[in-house]
Image: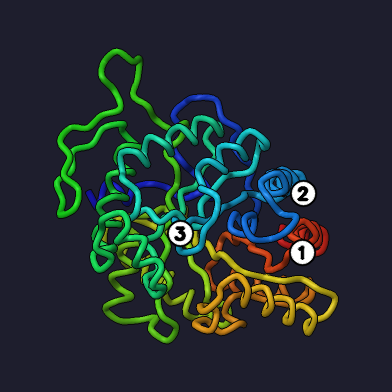
Amino acid sequence: HRTALARGRGPSCGRRDRGRSGTGPARALMHVGVNLNNREALIAPGYGIPELLDLGQRAEELGFDSVWVGDSLFSKPRYEPLTLLAALAQRTRRVELGTACLVTSLREPIQLAQAWATLDVISSGRTILGACAGNVAEDAVKREFEAVGLDWRRRMTIFEERLRVVRHLLRDGRVTFHGEHVDLDDVAFHTGMEPAPLLPVREPPVWVVANPAIGKAKGGDVSRAARRVGLLGDGWLTCCRARHPEETEAFVVAVGAARAEEGLGMGSFAVAYQVTMTLADTRDEAVAAQRAYIDGYYPGFSDAVALADWGPAGTAADVLDWMRTFAAAGVTAFVCRFASLDQLGQVERFASDVLPRCR
């Protein structure tokens, strides 16, 4: 399974198209997307589903490359991501639609593949599957695994097996897989009555999440994570290391080494960073706003990550300098999550003051 799965291609170029009609989203030198914050739509006054959908449409109008939503069951309650992306697909025509990130280990893989293929058809082939195993540093996430009958201690093996099954079904519409947690014999989205199996418009690129601990850019744990990212995914999606471009660069090197062992290059492999940021007239104003937002958004958890590691808070020049530093470390795509109750204001400010200088 491993080698076959590794032969996908990332979102920057060269994805295989199945020959159906699609928008063929245009590419910039630096891919910049917006996380629409589907948790905030539950907790912030004045920002609900209508505003979230409007923001996605506005992001496309302003020139962003993609829009994203997050995922959790009940550890951080939010609106369900695939349903939202289907709605966003109807409000947009060009931007790609992604999850940052979908806790794939919690989803039954056949149902997930069916849902994702349908979403990709609805969007004319504009989806990116950001996939993660779940952050069990939070006790509430452990309870999510328990609630669906899974052992959180086995989440990485569960994640790998389920993601492999999803990828086989999205590529071929058929899978046979015998693993520790998944056992399937010739499951197919095709009975013979249909002209063809249920397939996405294009094989969706998969960005695998890994956030190695700061200060441990080398070693056995990182090597395993790099191999998982490099061979299961078409890209790497990370966060929470905003003061450490050298850590990001070291992990990119490790991923490249893992892919090289299988005869795979890095030319089309995406390196994506989901960054929490705040723009203001002064750095002090931005830092204060970001601290207040994160303390409210992650009660009891924000202390686990130093404020500066979430992302830049400052002027447009500060944010652009940060992005350029990480681009030099190998990052090819940024998913911007704005730490503000004024989501539209931050998106428009970024589009005016930062985005044109990313091109």
Residue 311's x, y, as percent? 62, 75
Q: Which of marks 3 and 1 precedes in the sequence?
A: 3
Q: Amino acid at mark 3?
A: Phe
From the viewer's side, name the closer residue of 71 and 173: 71
Q: Residue at x 53, y 84 (%)?
A: 303
Q: Residues within 10 Å of mark 3 (few under 14, many from 20)?
A: few
Q: Residue at x 77, y 56 (%)?
A: 344
Q: Of the residues tagged 2 and 3, which is closer to the observer?
A: 3
Q: Quadrant of residue 103?
A: bottom left
- Residue at label 2? 62
Q: Which mark is residue 280?
A: none
Q: Are marks 1 and 2 in contact (CB under 8 Å)?
A: no
SS under mark 2: helix
- Residue at label 1? 354
Q: Is residue 267 above or below residue 277?
A: above
Q: Amino acid at mark 2?
A: Leu
Residue 332's x, y, as percent? 56, 61
Q: Residue at x 30, y 48 (%)?
A: 5
Q: Amino acid at mark 1?
A: Val
Q: Residues within 10 Å of mark 1 (few under 14, many from 20)?
A: many
From the viewer's side, name the closer residue of 333 and 308: 308
Residue 2's x, y, as percent? 24, 52
Side (left or right) of 98 relative to 342: left
Separation of marks 2 and 3 at Cα, in angstroms:
33 Å
- Residue at label 3? 74
From the viewer's side, name the closer residue of 223 and 148: 148
